Every structure is written in C-alpha cells, then in structure tokens.
Image (cartoon, grey):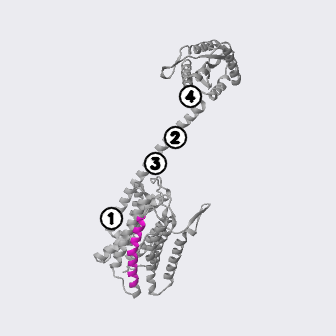
Amino acid sequence: MMLHHRSPAPGGGRQVRAVGKLQAWLPSRREAVAWAYVTAGVAVIVTFLVTSSPVRYLLPVLVSASVVPAIAVGVARNKPSSRLPWWLFAAGMAPFAAADTIWGLYQVRGDEVPFPGVADMLYLGSYLLFTAGLVALARREAGRLHWAGLLDAGIVTLGFATLFWAFIFAPYLRSELSAWPLAVSIAYPATDLLLLSVAARLMFTTGSRSPSFLLCLGWLVVLLAADGLYYGTQATTGTAIAEDVSEVGWMLSVLLLGAAALHSSLARPALAAAAQERMPRRRLSILIALILMGPLIVLANVGGIRDQPVDVTVIVGMMAALSLLLLLRVAFLAQFAQSRAIALAASLREQSVLQEQLSHQATHDPLTGLANRALLNERLESVLGRCSDDCGAGLVMLDLDGFKEVNDTLGHPVGDELLVGVAHRLAGRVRDQDLVARLGGDEFALLVEGVDERTLHDYTTRLLDAFTDPFILAHGHPVQVTTSIGARSITKPTAPTEALRDADTALYRAKTAGKNQAAFY
C-alpha cells in the first residue's frame, strides 16, 4: 500500500486590476521571483505527467524540497509581521521532502513502499507542523477568538467528518488491517480534518485577504482534494485510483506554498472580518448543504451503510452535534441582530436629538437661548396673516438703555451676563405662548397673540417694571439698566416687514423722548 503527502501554501505573484466587476490578475516586476518559481514548478509537474520513466517519481522531491528555501527567501525578502507560521511551514516541509525522497527511491527501484514505514511517520509529522503553522497564522490574521466563526468552522468540520466517515473511516475500520497499519491509515484523514478545521476558521474569521493569504487557502483546498481522492479510493477499493492525479495535486499544493511565501503581499496581513456574527447567504447555503450530507448518505445507502448499525449511529451522532452547533449559531445570529437593532435604535435617537439641537441652534440665540430673528420672522408670518379686530396681536421692540457703557466699563463678559439676565426677566414677565426674541446686540422683541391695544399697554408697563431692580451679576456685582420700548398693535393682516418697521419707529421715538419709556405706533 502506498500512502502519500500534503503541504500548506499561500500566495503567488499578481496585481489586481478591476475592470467593472471583473478582476484580472496581472504579473508585476516586483513578483518576478514568485512567477519564476511557479513557472519552474509547473515545468516539473508537466515533465512528471509526460515522462514514463520510473525516475519521474523523484520529481516530486524537487518541488517539495524547493519550498523550504522558497519560504526562507520569502520571509527574508517580504518581512511578514509574524514569521512563526512560515518557519513552522518550512519546518513541516523538511520531513515532507524527506518522505517524498524515500517514497520516490522505492518507486524508482520498483519495490513496494513499506507501510507503515519511516515515510509515513515523516508525512504525519509534517502534518502536525503544518497544523501548528496554521494555528499561528489564524492567531495572527483573525486576532482574538470569535465564537461565531468557530461555530461555523465546527459545522464545516463535522459536515466533512460525515463524508470522511462514510467514505474513508468506516471502510478502513471494516477492512482486515491489523491495529498498527489501521491506526496509521486513519491518522492521515484525521490530520486532514484537523487542517480543514483550522482552515475553515481562517476563512470565516478574516475579511480582506491578501493574494498570499488566498494562495494559502488554495494550498489547503488542493491538498485536501488530493488527499480525499487518494484515501477515499484507497479505503473503498483497496487501490488508489488516479494516483497520478493525486500526485499532481500534492505537487501543486506545495508549489502554492512556496509561491505564497515569495509573494510580496506576505507582508500585508489579512484583516479580521467585521461583524463575524453575520450569516451571509452563501455561507448559510454551504452550512445547510453540509448538515444535509449525513441524511443524504444514509438515504442513498452509500456503501451499504444502512446495514451497518455502528456507522448509522456515528452519523446520527454527528448530525445531532451539527444540529446543536447550528442552534448555537442561530442564537449568536439572533443576539447579533438584537444588538444591531438596539444600536440602530440608539443611533436613530441620537440622530433625532442631534437634529433637534441643530434645529434649535438655527432658530435660537446661542447666548440667551431666546428665539432669534429667523424664528421671529417665521412666527410673524404665521400670526400677522390671521389678525383681526376680534383676534389682534402685538409686536414689542426693546432696546437697553446704557448697555454700551456697561460693555465699555465692565467688559464684554459682564455685558453678556447682563443680556442673559435680561432674557430671563423678560421671559418671566410674559405668557408661555408669547415669543421673546433677541434680534442682536442689546435689542429684543416680543410677539404676543390674542391681545388688544389696552392689553398691549399693560404688557409694556410690566416690561418697564422688570428693569426697576438692578441685575445682580457674577460675584454679587449689581448693574442697573433700563429699556426703551416701541410697540405696534395689529388688528388686521399685516406684512411682517411692515410691523417690524412700525415697532422700530416707535422704539426710536421712545429713545429720543428720554429713554426708559414706551412709545406706540
């Protein structure tokens, strides 16, 4: 019996140029070394396929042995942020190449390869080093553990484990192999499942991926496909069918590993996937297909599996474990959806508050908090257009007497504090539905609805009285100011500009008449 190899590999040499939705991978001068390496490797693989001499079985040694120096050169040239995964890959390729050499020499001499033998121990040792390298790579690329990604990887691993059991493990267990050869035969696909589990975690927990990283995943896909073809046919028929196809797959996989190390994107780490709890439609389809694999195998009675109670029990157990993992995954998805809904609601509330703040800032004076000229004009448009004898309105303009002296003698900060105090007093002398506005500087305005001329006189008297007491500012400093008032009673629809002009005219008359008094238009 001849058992064979595998190996991990990222990268190649190319640049991506987007043309619409298409991407063309084009070589660059920077990737000349990687492309030369790939070209030489492909030439060796083609030679293996077209050559009939037994010496061709030593050609895989050239490819596998070339990966160690390729990784060394790539790491030295590209300087990845973490070198440990690549040194572990290189360490794994050394026994891998040694095992290829042993296997090739036996093939050249036409002798049967001892099984289990030294080559098998070397191959399995290389797999353990590859797994360690992938774990280190996963820790570097994906960062901290993400339970959603781990659950997805677990579902993928169990789904393929069902296939492995039906086509590899169960046939081997029913074979007449003794304990030691059986253990080694099962160890190969078991290490494949281990590699698959780590690769699935890498794929599900990374977002943006470099060409080197993608080629690393490509190595695993080719490697596992070649292994599956070899061990699946070996277990079910006793003979590896299409052995050369698997051999080409193994050579291609190690070639991808060396090319990945030589690619300049080795220095660019992949980014951890954002919101890994999400369940993209494509991933969901893959997971569902894997979950259905077990029932389909039983229904199709693959290899007469329904006549094997132990095999059916194992597959049912795997399906139960898969269902549990899927329930946990759905729980994570529901939790993620709920957290996103809460975050969205909080964001909408924050946006609403922000809009209210912006709207308030656009219509209110930043110093006093009173309405500004824009809001006053808006309200004047609304109120003055419906005035009548039965439902009149009043517009009052106020200008502080002596405010300039306060600014000049006590400073602008004291003047600002005085304006705030004036705003509070004015707001306290009117009704809630009345509008008090600051028009700028020391000029204020008051719009009152539902008042006649007599009531408007009472308003002006109340406003003048508001300035009788001094304003006590910071540090207990008293400031005395008065105000001049101009008022206009409105009993018919009037344009806002006309009302403002008339009230301002009345204010001017109050100022020229001696201040601290009210004048009516």
Circle 2: residue type: Leu
| 457 left or right, relative to 106 | right
Q: Earlier in the sequence, mark 2 or mark 1?
A: 1
Q: Alpha carbon of mark 3 to alpha carbon of mark 1: how far?
A: 36 Å
Does the residue at mark 2 contact the one at mark 3 (Cβ under 8 Å)? no
Magenta highlight range: 83-105
Mark 1 — residue?
313
Secondary structure, mark 3, is helix
Circle 1: residue type: Thr
Secondary structure, mark 4, is loop
Q: Position of residue 22 (x, y in %)?
A: 60, 63
Considering only vertical position in the picture, is 445 above or below 311? above
Q: Alpha carbon of mark 1 to alpha carbon of mark 4: how far?
A: 78 Å
- Residue 68 vs residue 297, the one in the foreground: 68
Q: Position of residue 423 (x, y in %)?
A: 56, 22
Mark 3 — residue?
337
Residue under the point 58% across and 32% down: 361
Residue 134 is at least partly visible in this image: yes
Mark 2 — residue?
348
- Quarter of image, res 468: top right
Mark 3, residues whose alpha carbon is within 10 Å: few (<14), some, or many (≥20)? some
Residue under the point 36% across and 62% down: 318
Mark 4 — residue?
367
